[in-house]
Image (tube, rainbow, N blue to C red):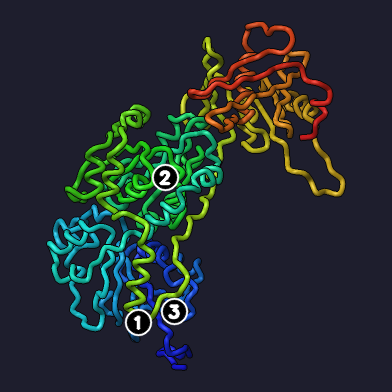
Amino acid sequence: MRTTDDGRRTTDDGRTVLFAARSAVALYRLLDVLPIFSGDDRITRLFTLVPGSDFGADALRAIEALGGRTVPWSEACARPHDLVVGASPKGDLGLLRGPHVLLPHGAGFNKSIPGEGSADSASGLDPAYLRRTHSHAPIALHALAHPDQVARLAATSPRAARRAKVIGDPTLERVLASTSLRDRYRAALDTGARRLLVLVSTWGPESLIRQHPGLPARLAAQLPCDEYQLALVVHPNERSLLGTYELTERLAPALDAGMILPDPHEEWASVLIAADALVTDHGSAALYYCAAQDRPVVSVHRGGGELIPGSPMHVLLDRIPQLGRAEDLVDALRAYRPGPGRTAAQAAFAPPGEAAALLRTEVYALLGLAPPAHDVAPRLLPAPAPAPRVPTAFDVHVATTAAGIRITRHPVGQGASGHHLAVEHGAAAEQLARSAGLLYRRPLPASAAPVDLAWTAGGWTRHALSAYPGCRSAAALLPCGGCLLRVRGHEQTYAVQVEPRSEDGRIVRIDPAVALSAVHARLVSPQPLPAGPTRMTCLIGDRAFRITLRPATDAEAAQVI
């Protein structure tokens, strides 16, 4: 046994590894490599916050949420460590004693920060930060993701390049290992058959969120909510700078319309796997999307002083469609042609598959230990959380065509008023319920009350038309999947059933509330309804759904909702 500088008693082959993070994004990169030490009781893992960054507060909170043991900076500098692992060369890392391992905290080294370090040097490869005057804190390993990065480093700092090796990108390998979970991620997000459009914003004055702050709200207002789902991935630095409250207040119109704002640690990557299309600035998150799949990606980057010519992101942005106006999104996505995304990813990442194993071999050699016998594999990304705000009132636009009734819904207040306002009773504000043309109610969860009280479908629809005199139709969604609909002035109640579609071995269903809007539009029109059951077609985007409308039975009206 031996006693360490902080009084801990450990075995002679025990080692202390200090993870030094200057910002939240750097910390998240360090967390991606933690599994290389998994299951090894010889390793003690400590964390410290490197001072001097405007974005450090979120890093400290993330360490605390993780349950990691933090060491104050002064204490971290006062004693040696067997290994110091960082993901940024900036700050006073040279004050931390022990061999240093430096990991990249992005993909591709695409940006230079004007007024910071050496002119035109990539942030992360800047020789101004890689020169070390402290002999007790050498960079023992500079882990890079692509041979071109070693060559770029050698061109500006040959001495630093001698310690550089191509390891790969551990974050990318988590993404690639998790691609088979795409359906699970989409289910967690409640995406369904909609197209998930993800906006990605880096940080700083040239970022999407700074240059186009109104774009999320404009897209949320423009895109039909039954055809598209919207998400925004914001760089951790920007989130740290603004704070979660300020950021969500600025994005309130889009968030109220159902936009997803994923967590900046792991959820962002899960959302990229789930995505169908991407809108990007010059930030490197787009390269992970392109490495995992060749789906449409368009650019909103308008140039500036940050993007490095010839970098992987420059390669990508030079070859993909530009999005001018939000209204042109669909055309820009159609203009994408496969290929440039893969090319850019290949310029940023070496062939994947070995990053975790290679990194473990290198760091254990530095520690003077044999690696554990068990294999190391990337940890799968967790399922993302669904949008916390889901629209419950819709401006419904109706177009009657030869093919059927086309329904286009937008969250209320996001655009022009439509044919009618459809509102979910019990989920939307009372003022909206009183303005509804179509008011509908979903079944409540089963009650645990000792004496229960519940509406029947027929009872609630009668009550709704009485309590809301401006309402034209009231409908109850039944537990069986059908609906009971009552229209003011009609003697009978109606049963509404929408059929699912079969597409390439999958079943596509729509929310019965969408079908109710099509039926409502038909029943309040002056066109007479044929006697007996009626077959209708509801058009949602490029899909057609068959609806059966018939008189409701007493048993259906008596169902508990």
Residue 368 tag number: 1
Mark 1–mark 3 CB contact (< 8 Å): no
- Sequence-wise first label, 1 or 3: 3
Quarter of the figure that contains the C terminus: top right
- Sequence-wise first label, 2 or 1: 2
Q: Is 173 on the left or on the right of 304, as rendered? A: right
Q: Is 392 on the left or on the right of 345, as rendered? A: right
Regarding mark 2 in the picture, which secondary structure is present there? strand
Would you call the spot at circle 2 few (<14 residues within 10 Å), some (14-19), or many (20 or more)? many
The type of residue carrying mark 1 is Gly
The type of residue carrying mark 3 is Ile
Which of the pair 60/294 is nearer the observer?
294
Whether residue 26 is visible to the viewer of this picture, yes or no, is: yes
**Residue where numbered disc 3 is placed:** 43
Would you call the spot at circle 3 few (<14 residues within 10 Å), some (14-19), or many (20 or more)? some
In the rendered view, would you say 241 is above or below 34?
above
Q: Is 361 on the left or on the right of 517, as rendered? A: left
The type of residue carrying mark 2 is Leu
Place of residue 121 in the rendered image (x, y in percent of width and height, measured from the top left) = 17, 58
**Residue where numbered disc 2 is placed:** 232
| Closer to the eye: label 1 or 3 | 1
Q: Give the quarter of the image for residue 53.
A: bottom left
